[in-house]
Amino acid sequence: MKNRKRIGILTSGGDCPGLNAVIRAVVSHATLTYDWEVLGISYATQGLLEGKATTLKMHGLDLRGIDPLLFMGGTILGTINKGDTLAHASEIIAGYQTLELDSLIGIGGDGSLSILHNLAHQGNWNFVGVPKTIDNDVALTERSVGFDTAVNTITNALNALTFTAASHDRVMIVEVMGRKAGHLALQAGIAGGADMILIPEIPYSIEGICQHLAQLRDRSWRKFAIVVVAEGIEVLKGSSDFNGLCQPTSRCGMGQYIADQISRCSTQKIETRVSVLGHIQRGGIPSALDRLVATAFGKAAVDLVAQGKYDQMVAWQNGQVVAVPLPEVMLQSPSPVDANEYLVLTARSLGIYVGDDFQFSE
């Protein structure tokens, strides 16, 4: 029979930098402040299904005085973003009881949090959510763990690619993640000096792209360009006949599609190259901001458990951490880029093409 309060923690969905910093903060605060036992659950709902968990202790996480969790990418608990959760819902729900948990803290994106929220509702769990995703599209929070590091990773890639683009007078097209929301492409594109940013929320046209490329070459000595493409942009209407060109599939993404469309409609020969950053965006050492947000989220999640405030998600609003109801988060997620938001207007004021809602003057 356990005497101490026991809380579980898991990471679910795609990995990102900063997950371990959340775990570190939860374990530190829960054990040092409240003297609770913290169980790390392996591979998200799979761990609950199989009853796999390990007691996490701060001295066991340290290495000769070094704290690796603060700057280690990925997640020490492992994570999954696949599997038929509905088919095994009853067994997963039972895992919470098998592990004798008093509450559970789940770190996930909008999809993972939705699944965990539903399981918690069915199983009457005491559940608190922590938002993480490089897409930054979880509703009601200005920041999610992992987003800032991914923006920095893409920005560094754009910096490097600019030199080779300039050396060869090429249009360098960089495909980044973002199936439903373009926050990552927008912010990294602005920070990395992109000439064009294509995101799912704002319509574009190949005519607008080609016009902007022509204007860049006519108005300056620059003969190169950097184009940031979110993977979730739509195929242009009327382009179903690809004539041997790229048709977006799992092997030919939207970056290559835009490159082929540029070569197809340009009156002048434009040499293009495509770089797909892929899972590089999920890796790396978490930035200082991601570490701070992750630490603040972990501390706040533990405090919600201590206060008995469940069915909540911690969120970053106006420079501080607040609690927001999970049902409201689920109702409004994923959260897209507003076509009239300040950063979109900022990009356009700098002469960046961000779709056809803005027309460049002659």
Image: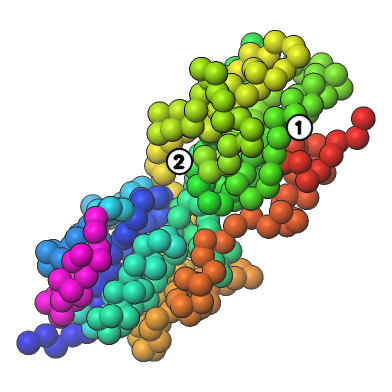
Say whether disc 2 or disc 1 marks the residue closer to the N-terminus: 1
Q: Where is residue 283, by image quadrant?
A: top left
Residue 337 on image: x %, y %: 64, 55
Q: Which mark is residue 335?
A: none
Write the residue at 61% across / 30% down. 239
| Location of the N terminus (image quadrant) | bottom left
Is residue 355 visible in the rendered image? The answer is yes
Is residue 159 visible in the rendered image? The answer is no
Disc 1 is placed on an element classified as: helix
State left or right for residue 228 relative to residue 61. Answer: right
Q: Is residue 322 above or below residue 141?
A: below
Q: Which mark is residue 208?
A: 1
State left or right for residue 289 relative to residue 212. Answer: left
Name of the residue lying farthest toward the left: 1
Q: Main secondary structure of the magenta part?
A: helix
Residue 27 on image: x %, y %: 29, 69
For label 2, the residue is 281
Residue 48 on image: x %, y %: 18, 67
| Location of the C terminus (image quadrant) | top right
Q: Is residue 65 above or below residue 221?
A: below
Write the residue at 56% across / 25% down. 241
State left or right for residue 41 relative to residue 119. Answer: left
What whole-number distance in Å separates the C-alpha atoms at marks 2 and 1? 28 Å
Disc 2 is placed on an element classified as: helix
Q: Is residue 292 above or below residue 320?
A: above
> What is the magenta range?
83-100
User: Which amino acid, by three-letter code, is at mark 1?
Assistant: Gly
User: Which amino acid, by three-letter code, is at mark 2?
Assistant: Gln
Front-most of residues 279 and 298: 279
Write the residue at 72% across / 41% down. 355
